[in-house]
């Protein structure tokens, strides 16, 4: 059903919780209180609909090497430095990125600047 290395998401309030499909109905993700972990698809989804954000990976060997490293030394959840997107993109691409965090930070900055400059 899912390709190995696919970036998956489930809705979580106004955000999307991200993970990476590792095969055999397992998902690697990072969540508050648990940190980085390999869990079942049902534990990842928690009854919410799962969406494929990006399909698979080209190099399974590189993907599984990164996944093994992450599982061997799991990192704690940190919304700014190690959230679910950081963890999943690091395993998929080798680079930790969080587009949601960047987007929300930019929006908050713009709103703050607007509020600060519109005062009379």
Image (spheres, rainbow, N blue to C red):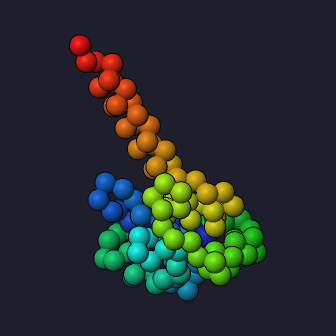
| Residue 105 to residue 3: above or below | above
| Camera sees residue 2 | no
Q: Residue furthest top?
A: 120
| Residue 110 to residue 24: above or below | above
Q: Nearer the viewer, residue 15 or 47?
A: 15
State the residue at coordinates (32%, 71%).
48
Location of the C terminus (image quadrant): top left
Q: Nearer the viewer, residue 58 or 100?
A: 100
Residue 106 placement (x, y as % from top left): 44, 37
Q: Is residue 53 left or right of residue 22?
A: left
Q: Is residue 68 left or right of residue 78?
A: right
State the residue at coordinates (44%, 70%).
31
| Camera sees residue 98 | yes
Residue 91 placement (x, y as % from top left): 63, 67
Q: How many marks?
A: 0
Q: Is residue 119 left or right of residue 73?
A: left
């Amino acid at each position: 059903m899912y390709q190995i290395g696919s970036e998956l998401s489930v809705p979580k309030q106004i955000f999307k919780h991200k993970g990476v499909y590792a095969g055999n109905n397992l998902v690697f993700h990072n969540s508050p209180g648990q940190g980085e972990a390999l869990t079942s698809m049902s534990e990842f989804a928690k009854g919410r609909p799962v969406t494929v954000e990006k399909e698979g990976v080209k190099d399974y060997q590189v993907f599984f090497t990164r996944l093994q490293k992450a599982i061997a030394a799991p990192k704690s959840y940190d919304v700014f430095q190690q959230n679910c997107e950081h963890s999943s993109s690091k395993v998929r691409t080798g680079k930790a990125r969080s587009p949601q965090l960047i987007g929300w930070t930019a929006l908050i900055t713009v709103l703050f600047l607007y509020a600060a400059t519109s005062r009379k």
